[in-house]
Image (cartoon, rainbow, N blue to C red):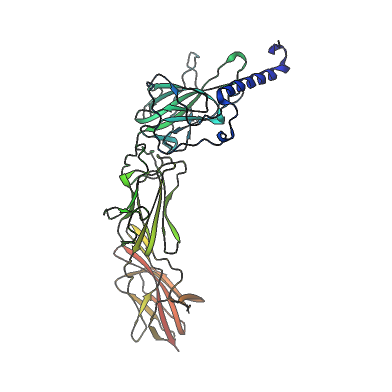
Amino acid sequence: MVVLGRDRRLRAQVVAIAAVGLVIVLGGLGLGSPPAETASPRPSGPARTVAPTRTAPASAAAVSPSVGPAAACLPVAPDDPLPAVRLRSTSGDQAAVPGSAGAAPSDQPDGSPAPAGWTVPGLERGILLPSGASLVVEAGRSACLTSVAVALAAADAADPGTAATDLRTVRPERLADELDLGGLPGGDWVVRLAIEFARVPQRGGEAGEPRIAFFRVVSGDVPVLAPSPQVTPAVACGPDPLGSGPPGLVLVIDDGPPILAQDGGGAGGPVAVRLGQAIEVWAVGDVCARGWSLEVADGVGNAFLQESYPNPVDNPFLAAQNRWTLTQLLIGDSTVSATIRFGRDRLVAGTWRLRLEAPALAAAMANGPTGPGVPVLPGCGQFWDYPGGTAFEPCFVQSVPDDLEPLDVVAGSVVRIELDGWSVVEWFARCGAERVGASAPSEFTTLDECDLGGRSGGVTIAFVPWPGERLILIGITAHRDGITAYGNYYLRVRAAP
């Protein structure tokens, strides 16, 4: 027999032999090296699934049923730090969140250790636990869990430690690196877990201290937003009970009847809309989403992002939304696409075709010092800024209107542009050439060093064109009745010597 205290060279060998023996014993319990298919990451489970029925009384020791396929786990070596732990819900709506460490214990005046205070994690690391779902604790480094003591206190308690309730202690039927802890009563809770791990035997048989971790859990079907959320919902979040499935999406115009998505049973024709209307995508039942992306695309597939909040961890407390207002529209025909996430694996998409007819831009006339004036005609590329949103017309080329009447003036004369009923905000003028292609419309191309000037403020538009026959582009921004509009206007000028 070898005495460890007399031969230090053999200590490490004997401890290693003991560790191998424990692994062999654990292997006999089904915890040895897993087959190839169990070595892959464990599944998170189907979204919004109902937790297993539990009959253990609340404050009594409970035995957890197996959670998914049996996974291999390992004991914690004496010199290794305790593994980190994470907590998730069996609803599958969120990624597992890490625990917050408790405060270090301090000494009382008589020298005896004082109980450590409770840590209250913020909702940015919170878990939403729907009714009927369970909490599952996961151990890092595939460590074997032997027991977890669950205590909870109200998150708004002045001193959660003194108001805490010991809920239950859960021990596994079979050692594993995750453990179902059961559900919680409704409320906003701080949950304290005291986690015991299987350990490699060490001299003296000391069990070691448990891992203490604190979590913020809101038990209920409606999230409670953090004190300073990044996004708040348009209306109060509707209930989202376990097993209800993801809600549908509808388009609503000026609080009118809901319009189904055209890839979900809605009519195939475009929906006629106007500037100034409230155009919104709603989640049916006002269920709040955790992440979203909305974009509008023109007729050839160029997409413009409306609004996006990715929320990769699906935290329901940092951002929640159930109605999305479309504030950037395309003039003409377009397609609105919404991709909305209501938690992990609960994604809903919808598309609607829109047709926006913009009002006419301000009528404009060009006048020389003498003779009759001619209309200045708008081409493609108008932009509108109105209360509640904007709209613009995507253009692939700067198209020149047909039938431009030439304005005849003497070279060196001033040409003035007047708008009917609008105030000029700013303007610029460039001369260019017309490139005529095989198909209409013809394209305007700017000539280098042919800048006819520009000004901002409430002024008239006036410039001196170059001699000869010129095609001139005039960009005009004007304002009337709370609406600002921009247009590309075109004018032909013949400035004779």
In the rendered image, the vertical position of residue 149 relative to residue 215, given as above or below: above
Quadrant where the C terminus lies? bottom left
Q: Residue at x 36, y 71 (%)?
A: 459
In the figure, is residue 101 to the left or right of 282? right
Query: x, y percentage for residue 444?
Result: 46, 75
Q: Residue at x 60, y 18 (%)?
A: 201
* Residue 469, visible in the rendered structure: yes
Quadrant where the N terminus lies? top right
Query: x, y percentage for residue 399?
Result: 43, 74
Query: x, y percentage for residue 267?
Result: 32, 58
In the rendered image, the vertical position of residue 333 relative to residue 113, given as above or below: below
- Looking at this view, name the residue that lies furthest to the bottom: 497
- The answer to which image quadrant residue 159 occupies is top left
- The answer to which image quadrant residue 319 occupies is top left
Q: How many marks?
A: 0
* Residue 155, visible in the rendered structure: no
Q: Nearer the viewer, residue 142 or 396?
A: 142
Q: Nearer the viewer, residue 178 or 187?
A: 178
Query: x, y percentage for residue 472?
Result: 43, 78
In the rendered image, the vertical position of residue 200 relative to residue 387, given as above or below: above
- Looking at this view, name the residue that lies furthest to the left: 256
